[in-house]
Structures are given as C-alpha cells and as structure tokens.
Image (cartoon, helix red, strand yellow):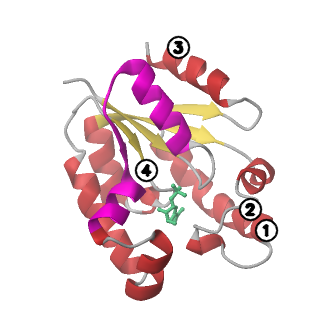
Amino acid sequence: MEKNIVLIGFMGSGKTSVGKKLSMDLKREFIDMDDFIVNKEGMSINDIFKKKGEAYFRSLEKELCKRFADPKSKIIATGGGVIKNDENVANLKKGGIILYLKSTPKQIAYNLRFDNTRPLLAGSGKEEKIARLLEEREPAYNKCADIILDVSNIDIDETLEKIKALIK
Ligand code: S3P
C-alpha cells in the first residue's frame, strides 16, 4: 500500500472537489471525512453541531483519523478543523503525505458565497469570520503540511496538474 494523500486546508479551499478528481485520475479510493461522518450519523454537519455540539463532532473526527494512521493508498479530504488536534495530525502524518491547499480569505469567501453548510461561518460577516479563523489556524496548517500549494489563483485543472507533479 502507498501512503495516503491527505488534503488539508480551510473550508472552501477545494479539498473535496480536488480530492474527487484526483482519485479518478490516480485511480485511488476517495474518502471525504465530513461525508463519512454525515452518513454515519444520518445528520448534516449543521445538525450534528446544533443537536450534539462541536465537541461531539470533533470526537468523531478524531476517531476517524485513527483509521488513517496506516498507508492505504487513499485520497482523503479532511474537514478544515482537523489540524486543531495534535493526535489527528500525528495519525494522518503516519499514514500519509499531507498536502495543504492554501487560499486567501477573499477567495474562500467567494467560493463559499452561496454556502450555508458551515456552522462556524453562519450569519453575517462571512469574510471577516474566515479571515479571523484562518489567521488562527494558518500556523497549524503550515506546520503539519509536507507540501503547500497556493490555490488562490489557479483553477481545479491547474491544481490537479500541480499536485500530480508534486507527488511524483
Ligand atoms: C470545519 C470544516 C468543515 C466541517 C465542519 C468544521 C472547520 O469541513 O468539518 O463544518 O472547523 O473548519 P470543510 O473544510 O470540508 O468545509
């Protein structure tokens, strides 16, 4: 088995879209952590946060990361907050190469302009919320990444070409 390719980065930076396409191109299995959790709980992320709380969601996320501590040749799209927990990072790193899709608050706010599925960005002042949370998390993203790819000015096809060249 080869190392997993683990996509990290802020909400709306393209982890899921990139991961899906990459999995088709590389013929590797794709797992979206949020989708996995939603299916398991039978509830949307919004409802999990509302009805069970963020701490419960983080515990599910943590359990799931433990499964990825071994190389299984998968492409994994993580949730943007996965890096908040050191044990998650250690597990993901053990089994995979960590690729940070780095973007700007402006681009992220644009990508998420019609989105209402992120409980942490609900309400008004989305771009400010993004900027604040990104500033807080940026050091953790940078620290745990094996590869950093700035995707703020490139489209998905270009992103895929770059990733394929970087992981060769
Ligand atoms: C979160 C990111 C979301 C999801 C949850 C919390 C975060 O995933 O896990 O809403 O803390 O950044 P995406 O990065 O796929 O949006």
32 versus 99 height, above or below: below
Residue closest to the far bottom:
51
Helix, strand or loop under label 4: loop
The residue depicted at 65 percent of the width and 65 percent of the height is: 133
Which of these two is toward me, 142 or 167? 167
Position of residue 10 measured from the top left corner of the image (x, y, whole percent):
59, 53
Position of residue 83 measured from the top left corner of the image (x, y, whole percent):
45, 56
The residue depicted at 54 percent of the width and 40 percent of the height is: 17
Position of residue 122 measured from the top left corner of the image (x, y, whole percent):
66, 76
Disc 3 under 8 Å from ligand 1? The reply is: no
Mark 2 sits on what residue? 131
First in sequence: mark 3 or mark 4? 4
Mark 1 sits on what residue? 128
Is 150 left, or right, of 54 in this rendering?
right
Mark 4 sits on what residue? 78
Is 131 left, or right, of 36 in this rendering?
right
State which region is magenta. Answer: 15-40
What amino acid is labelled 2 in the image?
Ala
28 versus 128 height, above or below: above
37 versus 12 height, above or below: below
Which of these two is toward me, 82 or 79? 79
Helix, strand or loop under label 1: helix
Disc 4 under 8 Å from ligand 1? The reply is: yes
What amino acid is labelled 1 in the image?
Glu
Disc 2 + disc 1, Cβ < 8 Å: yes
Helix, strand or loop under label 2: helix
Disc number for residue 165: 3
First in sequence: mark 4 or mark 1? 4
